[in-house]
Amino acid sequence: MGNLQKGDKKLLNAWAFYDWANSVYTLTIASAVFPIFYEALFADKSHYIDVFGMHLKNSALISFITALAFLVVAFISPLLSGIADYVGNKKSFMKFFCYLGALSCMGLYWFDLDSIYSGLLFYFLGLLGYWGSLVFYNSYLPDIAFTEQQDAISAKGYSLGYIGSVVLLIINLAMIMKPKWFGITGTEGVAAMKAMRYSFVMVGVWWILFSQYTYYFLPKGNKKTGESINKDIIFNGFKELKKVWFILSENLSLKRYLYGFFVSSMAVQTVMLVATYFGAQEIEWKTKEDSTTGLIICILLIQLVAVLGAYLTSKASEKFGNIKTLIVINTIWILLCVGAFIITLPTQFYVMAAFVGLVMGGIQALSRSTYSKFLPETTDTASFFSFYDVAEKVGIVIGMCVYGIIDQVTGSPRFAIVFLALFFFIAVLLLKRVPSKKAS
């Protein structure tokens, strides 16, 4: 359709519904089912595998692949955003990355240690597809919504994404726990693994199917210039980042805050990406089935508690100010990382997951809103948030590499997790140096 007027309610709802379609990737693939499945492949073997001419620990390997994917995303995001500003049919770009990610999720059905290279490629492309589609998805917001509508419709998208991802994860959990109910045959362990493979296919189907509603109503794209795409346009995103970098040198508050955010985000995103692998390896579950069920329940617990955490963080920032609240949250993260070094029992892991949800739910939203408060008076907010997103992704690359290297050298993710406490400590020191009057 794609001919609705800017601000039209039907158009806004269709845009927000893409969160319902794609958020199943972050929960099922990035956080819950795939990490459990990946760890289970090594259940009858050591945690090491010979790959790329090296003898790597499985969790270190997936950390390095994740870091590589985010490095590529960090590089191509400015390229894509530069094109998105000028191209007349950015919906086609969005579809390409959406289908690349969704089909790659389906490809994980065949993930096996005997075909490790193709499996890792599907994992890599799935991550690339998800983040690539978001570049164009986010760029639509100012095109389809007026300024006064953008906060509300963006929040609605996040809410739809949360609900949709939890709905599918609950279905997947039922399949894994009770495979016979869904006609999945085999011994208990074999049937559970089959159910996990089916869940990867379901993510891909869900993502493609529900995104069609979004594509039906979204316009092709608002071409902002009559120029054809050339080298200058392609590299425009990098020019914008360079411009922001020079502005930062003149804005002490924003520069100091970004340093603190970069280090904090580096640790937060790493913990979120490796939490399930840590739980699978280091917690003393009674049986393999208890491990699978317990880890997925922990992910659901984190998701639910995160809602409360976001609310409490919002109230705390209103009373005490953004910077002071962020300092307290980062301090709690330090304690959680140190605590992770000593926990061994499922009950302890559940308690840890609840606290992680509390601080995870607020730190991301508060970090972004604090950044927006420090921005100078400008109409070019897209460039500043592009810089923010690239900084976040580069932080993930560094965090995942540090985690992977320590895990590989020591053979234990405990040492890697507790090392992340150092990042949070540094973030606290950096945030203490930020003048808080503008973000209070």
Image: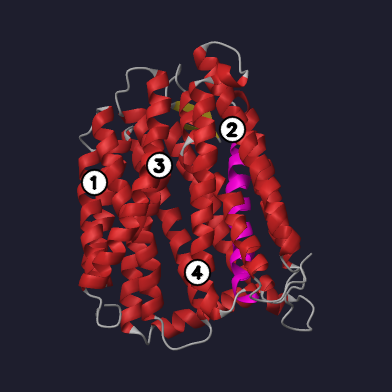
Looking at the image, which residue is at 46% across and 28% down?
A: 39
**Residue 124 magenta-highlighted:** yes
Look at mark 2 in the image and give the residue it sits on. 199
- Is label 4 in contact with label 3 (beta carbons under 8 Å)? no
- Specify the quadrant that holds the N terminus: bottom right
- The Cα–Cα distance between marks 2 and 4, rounded to whole angstroms, is 32 Å
* Residues packed near mark 4 inside 10 Å, few (<14), some (14 to 19) or many (20 plus): few
Look at mark 4 in the image and give the residue it sits on. 152
Up the image or down, 160 lies above or below 239; here it is above
Q: Main secondary structure of the magenta part?
A: helix
Dot 1 or dot 3, earlier in sequence: 3
Report whether 99 appears left or right of 179.
right
Q: Amino acid at mark 3?
A: Val
- The Cα–Cα distance between marks 1 and 3, rounded to whole angstroms, is 14 Å
The residue sitting at the front extreme is: 9
Dot 2 or dot 1, earlier in sequence: 2
**Residue 177 magenta-highlighted:** no
- Is label 2 in contact with label 1 (beta carbons under 8 Å)? no
Q: Secondary structure at mark 1?
A: helix
121 or 332: nearer the viewer: 332
The dot on residue 274 is 3
Residue 376's image quarter?
A: bottom left
Q: Amino acid at mark 1?
A: Leu
